[in-house]
Image: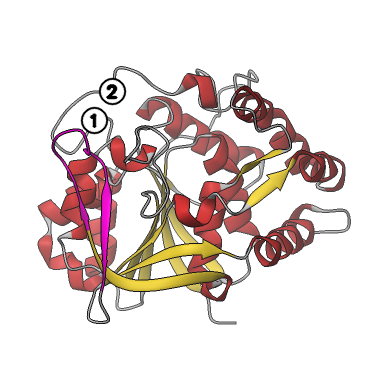
Amino acid sequence: MNQTVVIFDTDPGIDDAMALLLLHALPSIEIRAISTVFGNASIAACTRNALYICERFNLPYPVYQGAGVTFTGQAETDYPDFVHGLDGLGDVGFPAPSRHAESQTSVDYMIETLRATDEPIELLAVGRMTNLAEALRQAPDIAPLIQRIVMMGGAVAVPGNVTQWAEANIYGDPEAAAFVFDSGVPVLMVGLDATLEHRMKKTSLMALRHELGDAGEFLWQIKQCYLKFYADKGIFDGFPIHDSTAALAVVHPDCFEMRRGNLVCETQGEQRGRTVFTESEEGVHEVAMAADSAQLTTIFETAMHAKYGAGSL
């Protein structure tokens, strides 16, 4: 089977944790490395969480620590603990991992890896675009070496989830998103237009708890914080699975309505963080404008049961 090789850039994060387990379960994806970025929690917490997940589930991927401040050097002052908990994983109280991050930074790793290989490598970014922008700023020669960037973030025809205009990953570092969009690298944006259509019901999460062994119990524990957040918003029957939807878009584009064009990101004024999309057949970007939730759910559940369910190796 031909596999798509990805570097997974992530800020675990409850949703990111599920996406990492899904990526490990998808036979058509090969994770080359995990790159961390601040966002759902501090960079120290996000890196610790990535290491903990890899250690708990014996995932063989090196973890490289990335940016702890924005592309313009701004520190975060208000992490979304009301969504992900203070520690980023729902404040369940998991022990510190014994594994450590690699000594090389994620930006240096990306630059070195892209320069050294002829094989196609995609960057799957489900947090802020800070690491990708910094790698492209330091080494613009890597732009034609990146097969594609698949990102979770942004919104086109639906409102943002931080402001009327802006989605959280983009709003957290719009200068980074703008730099990446202007780099000439092909980008597939899987934003709220698609991810809000792919939801997991609470009953499905309960079933996974009983069917996926330790992975199911882990997801059930961390998702309690997530369930409470959405219940407080009046959504009681489940939650969208943003990052896993983007992961599935890497290898199952047929499950989405894709449109080609060009993206820009607003960095000023009240629309700061807005992703503006102009359709064009000559564009270098694609946007997932809708998603087939039923089909994506089937693919998700099939992969997870094969990897973590009873009788899996």
**155 in relation to 103, above or below:** below
Residue 269: name its quadrant: top left
Which image quadrant: the C terminus?
bottom right
Name the residue rendered at 51%, 49% in the picture: 243
Q: Which residue is mark 1?
A: 69
Q: Which residue is mark 2?
A: 76
**What coloring was used for the rendering?**
secondary structure
Q: Quote the CA–CA distance across marks 2 and 1.
A: 7 Å
The residue lying toward the viewer, choosing from 88 and 164, is 164
**133 in relation to 1, above or below:** above
Q: Secondary structure at mark 1?
A: loop
The x, y position of residue 185, in whole percent, is: 23, 67
Q: Amino acid at mark 2?
A: Glu
The x, y position of residue 70, in whole percent, is: 22, 34
Name the residue rendered at 65%, 23% in the picture: 228
| Residue 164 in view here | yes
Residue 25: name its quadrant: bottom right
Tag 2 near tag 1, CB within 8 Å: yes
The verdict on residue 266 being magenta is: yes
Viewer-nearest of labels 2 and 1? 2
The span shown in magenta is 264-279
Within 10 Å of the Cα at label 1, are there few (<14), some (14-19), or many (20+) other Cα atoms?
some
The residue lying toward the viewer, choosing from 222 and 296, is 296
| Residue 147 in view here | no
Q: Earlier in the sequence, mark 2 or mark 1?
A: 1
Q: Secondary structure at mark 2?
A: loop
Q: Amino acid at mark 1?
A: Val
The x, y position of residue 71, in whole percent, is: 18, 39
The x, y position of residue 271, in whole percent, is: 22, 39
The verdict on residue 234 being magenta is: no
